[in-house]
Each structure stands twice: as structure tokens, then as C-alpha cells.
Image (cartoon, helix red, strand yellow):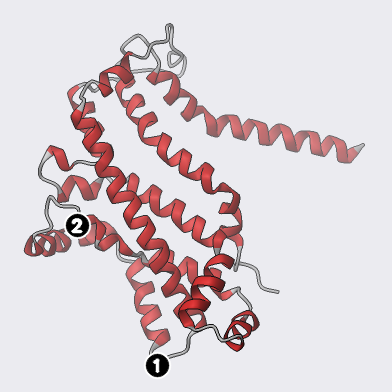
Amino acid sequence: MKKRILNFFFYVICILLCLIFLFPFVVMLFGSLDGETKYAVTLTSWFPTQFSLKQYQSVLSVGGRMSRWVLNSVIISVIPTITGVFLDALLGYIFAKKRFPGRQLIFWYFMAAIMVPYQATIVSNYLLYSWLGWINTYWAFLIPGMWTVLYMFMMRQNIAAIPDALLEAARIDGAGEWRTFLQIVLPVSKPGLSTVAIFSFMNNWNNFMGPLIFTTSEKMYNLVVGLSSLNQQSASFNMQMTAGVITFIPMFLVYMAFQKYFVDGITVGSVKG
């Protein structure tokens, strides 16, 4: 009986926490569907008195600009995600399973780079990209985004959990390094690859500072920066919530597609034994 009571309170607390965490998303959705234009809301006035799609119609009415912003977001999100997943896995495999002079020194040099805030490198990056002619081009996002130190570290931890005996068996069967990596390591590392893909896509899709600084024309804006410019023209609560919903949908779809492996990718390699 005592256990049932404890379980009851446990589930009640979990449900309450879920409602608290879901509340901002509900406000965002209802705010985008509110037919009455609002410039400020309170805790009791966020629920719409009438539902309407006029905010979405207003955003979509920009026509060609919106399609170009979506295309830019897809390019600077999908391509770095694909290249990043492959190269992060490859580097993770090298640092996890290979032995070569200077391996630890190089690895900790990469780890030290994580400690440098992105904002601290903005000026130097801008000067470099300007010298290379990358300002207002896709190269400013595709080349630096080919791989990420943090995701390489995640893949190293993931691949380190693969038994060495499995790789040795592949080599005994005549598999070379590339075949071992492509046919053994990558399939076994699906949870980690999926996790890196989700994080990489979310980070690139939500990238605001980079496109804002490294692009100089409206046609090169990504969706986040483009919708932000629309918010400045009509800074209503409804428009801001509509922009939030539009940018949230692709990330939600990507997460739903890879959620099967998401938890495994976070926890694998964290416990030994």
C-alpha cells in the first residue's frame, strides 16, 4: 500500500513537471493562432479570445524572401550535419582506437578549443573570412561547420565502448581500415551518430549570430535572422510566437525521426563495466 502511494505521488509530480515545461510551448502555439494583435501579455491574457491563421498568412506573404530564407537554412544546416556526422565519427574512431605519437597532445589541444567562447572568435573569424572572400557566401558556414570538436569528443566516447575484439575479428577476416570503419564502427555507433545529427542540426538551424554577422544582404539570411527582421518591422507578441513556431517545427521533426537512438546515444560509453 505504501509503495502504491509513493508511486501515485511520483506520477503526479512527473505530470506537473511536464505541464510546467510544456506551458511555454502551449503559449507559443496559442500566441501564433491569436486573432487579436497583442504587443504585451500577462499570465492571464495569453489564451486567445479568437483563433486565426492571419499571422502565418502575414509571414508567408513575403513570398520569395521566405523561400530563400528556408533554402539558406536548409543548406547551412543539412550539409554541415552530414559532413559533421561523418568526420566527427572518423576522428572519434581515430582518437578512440588508434595509437600514434602525439595522440593525447593533439586530443587535449582540441579539448582546450572547447573552452574558448564562440563570441571571443567572432572578430578574428570575420577578418579571416573577409580575407578569403567568404563574407555573404555559404562557405562561411559550410567549411567551418564540417566538423565540431564537441561532437568529435562525443563520438570518441561512443566508439571507445566498442569492444576491441570486434574490430580485431574484422581485421582477421581481411577487412581494411575503411571497411572496418564503414561496415563495423558506423553501424554499431548509430545511437551516437543520431545524437550528433540532432545536436548538429539544431545548432546550425538556430544559428543566429553567425548569419547575422557574416551575411550582408537579405537574400543570404537564414530563416532565424529573416524572421527576426520581420519581427522588427512588426514587433507584436503574435508575430514573435509565429516565428518561434515556424523555426521550431523542423527541429521537432528531426528529433522525432532520430528519437529512437537519442537516449542511447547520450548514455552509451558513460558507464563502464
Q: Nearer the viewer, residue 185 or 237?
A: 185
Q: Residue at x 39, y 50 (%)?
A: 201
> The N terminus appears in which quarter of the rendering?
top right
- Residue 84 screen position, x and y as percent: 37, 62
Q: Nearer the viewer, residue 60 or 117?
A: 60
Image-quadrant location for residue 249: top left
Amino acid at circle 2: Ala
Q: Residue at x 29, y 60 (%)?
A: 145
Whether pointer 2 and pointer 1 mark residues with C-beta atoms closer than 8 Å, the reply is no
Q: Nearer the viewer, residue 121 or 33?
A: 33
Q: Is residue 243 left or right of residue 66?
A: right
Q: Which residue is mark 2?
A: 140
Element marked by disc 1: loop
Task: Give the vertical position of 186 relative to 122 (above or below).
Answer: below
Amino acid at circle 1: Pro
Q: Residue at x 42, y 10 (%)?
A: 51
Residue projecting furthest to the top: 50
Q: Which residue is mark 1?
A: 101
Task: Give the vertical position of 95 relative to 82 (above or below).
Answer: below
- Residue 240 screen position, x and y as percent: 31, 26
Sort mark 1 into few (<14), some (14-19) or many (20+) by Cα contacts within 10 Å. Answer: few
